[in-house]
Amino acid sequence: MRFVRISAIKLAKMFGLSEHDGMKLGEPSLDQLRIFIAVAEAGSFGGAAKAMGRAVSAISYGIAQLEAQLALTLFEREGSRRPVLTPAGEGLLAEARAIADAADALLAKARSLHAGQEPSLTLVIDVMVPGEVTAHVLGSFRQMFPTCALTLRIEGLGAVAACLIEGGADLALGGPVIGDHPMLERQAVGELDLVPVAAPSHALARAGVQPGESRRHLQLVLTDRSPLTEGREFSVLSPLTWRLGDLGAKHSLLKEGLGWGNMPRGMVAGDLAAGTLVELDLPEKPGAHYRLSALWRRDTRLGPAASWLVDAFRAGLAG
């Protein structure tokens, strides 16, 4: 018990408190905390006054009031031309900044709500959409809508639309496999090229492949996890299939020579250039244009953030 008491006394002295201080502290205002931050960042009362558009006397008074509220000395003033943070000031500066940042975020979100912006948004993207397009669009989205909390889901085939229909998403970017659905609105945003590929050592990689020969080789296909399109086949030619739930896994298996399959051209462009994959010249021409659409429920209205995303993905896919 003696060790605890001694530590408490030392801690109190470190922060400029007496042994009995700290029991009745005031409640600093947000403005006082902003003044404290400004002085610490500017390194002078004059610099803080200029940054905040206040008189120096107002800055000095704000610091004096804050120190009285906290019963702590935040700046050393004697013997120095510039105020220097005390240990107590250094210890409280991070918390003051956190409080001010939280207040700024609250006010920004309130202004966004007044403007009709969504406070949060759940976006579902088809696994076929190039990752670099998604990253670029969402990077700009963060700058445009900093207060909108985003949840991103990556799904394939019918699972994209299922998220919307089940109420688990606000906006989706999906492919052509769903078709028209009575609950969904659709707006075209672009298309991708799907190309049949395999490792250069694969039997189908040679020239002169005969019609029907692809049916004798293992085809890797993306599986459908949604009842909306369950049991339907999309560009499946071979009765010998491995069904995969992840496009990245399909990509890796293709490079290992385990079968052939369709892939987005953008995703395999580097492999085609490096020769780790080759585009197959099959008589059946299983490649396709994969049309992408923005999807949302008919009983909802797109807000500013969702509408911006539709336009941004259209521009990104066109470029």
Image: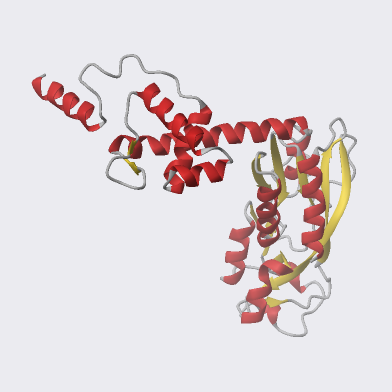
Residue 281 visible in this rendered orientation of the protein = yes
Task: Tally the marks.
Answer: 0
Identified at 77% across, 80% down, the residue is: 209
Furthest residue toward left: 2
* Outermost residue to the bottom: 207
* Looking at the image, residue 257 lies above or below residue 149: below
Q: Position of residue 82 (x, y in %)?
A: 36, 47
Rendered image quadrant of residue 109: top right
Q: Residue at x 63, y 75 (%)?
A: 271
Residue 199, placed above or below residue 14: below
Q: Nearer the viewer, residue 102 or 233?
A: 102
Image-quadrant location for residue 256: bottom right
The location of residue 62, given as percent across then percent down, is 47, 30
Quadrant where the image shows the N terminus: top left
Residue 286 point in image, percent of width and height: 81, 67
Q: Position of residue 314 (x, y in %)?
A: 82, 56
Query: Which of the 4 image quadrants contains residue 132?
Result: bottom right
- Image vertical order of residue 33 relative to residue 26, above or below: below
Image point (83%, 71%), residue name = 285
> What residue is shown at x 64% (from left), y 58% (from top)?
247
Q: Is residue 241 left or right of residue 39?
A: right
Of residues 47 and 137, which is closer to you in this image?
Answer: 47
